Image (tube, rainbow, N blue to C red):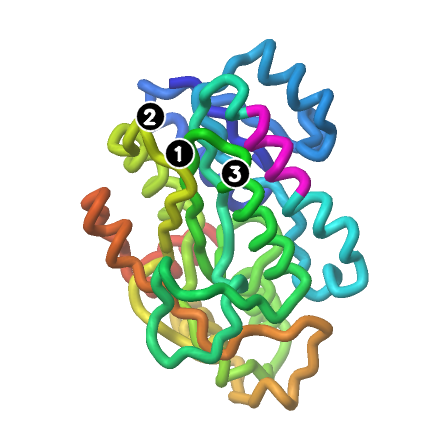
Amino acid sequence: MKILVTGSKGQLGQSFREMSVSYNNYQFLFTDKEELDITDEGAVNMFFKKNKPECIINCAGYTDVDRAEQEMAEAKLQNARGAAILSEAAAGIKALMIQISTDYVFDGKSHRPYTEHDSASPRSVYGKTKLDGEVEVILNSTRSVIIRTSWLYAPYGHNFVKTILQKARTEKELRVVCDQIGAPTYAPDLAKAVCDMLPAIPSKIRGEIYHYSNEGVCSWYDLAKAIADIKGLDCDIAPVMSKEYKTAAARPHYSVLDKSRIKKEYRLKIPYWRDGLYRCLERL
């Protein structure tokens, strides 16, 4: 199978690049904006005509949650229009489209893990544009899967884990939000799950949504404490409420994803979040 991975310089894209050496039965094509601008319809069509990928894993997109509140047009261009162009091109060559989405499509008012059947109601521009991207894929593709994930991090790129680690090494005290609850996801675990799923994805599948994150639940405060504890850092991490830590974009207070469907249909064994964190921190 020839697989195109877009956004290959991002956290998840780089994770697929690392994972690719373990999957010799797949031929990977890795692109980032320099090689393929997913918002350029002509460039995408030309690339697909030349390379004929059988599967597209779309890891590209606008991911700066707070800046998206001011750069709405750019966020919509990358997250919605880019997904539309890719899914239309994929449909043209009957390729499978895998769209990576987010827990931020939910408003966070639930008190139980969100299933794929729960109504989406994003609170931020980022969440809205990612939801728009999901809709575009469902409407335009002939074969498609949407995978929502949460609190993604990796040894590379910009993410909460690396930020906290850097600050905990240089500062004596940190204040971290304790009333936002979710599940961290180690990007290499997600990349492996997608690669393992591929042979089992039905030939006739369209717009099916799955949830994936590492197992377990924590707050951002719990995650920060775990980072400091695992690395043995002498930093006092204090819990604060969201109202004390203002951000441009509203975050869901609870965005735990129910992973029952993906585990059952693809027989996935998902690692615990702290185990994924330990493996990441070993590399930092």
Which residue corresponds to the image point at 73% horizontal and 73% vertical from the top-left?
248
The residue identified by callout 1 is 19
Which residue corresponds to the image point at 41% horizontal and 78% vertical from the top-left?
110
Q: CA distance from mark 2 to mark 3?
A: 15 Å
Mark linked to residue 23:
2
The quarter of the picture where residue 96 lies is: top left
Residue 278 in view here: no
User: What is the three-letter code of the residue carrying label 3?
Assistant: Gln
Circle 3 crowding by C-alpha within 10 Å: few under 14, some 14–19, many from 20: many
Magenta segment, which residues? 81-89
**Residue 84 part of the magenta segment:** yes
Q: Is residue 91 above or below residue 219?
A: above
Front residue of this view, candidates 196 and 254: 254
Which residue corresponds to the image point at 50% horizontal and 32% vertical from the top-left?
141
Outermost residue on the front side: it is 139
Left/right placement of residue 279 relative to residue 157 reads left
Secondary structure of the residue carrying numbered label 1: helix
User: What is the three-letter code of the residue carrying label 2?
Assistant: Tyr
Secondary structure of the residue carrying numbered label 3: helix
Outermost residue on the top side: it is 50
- Dominant SS in magenta: helix
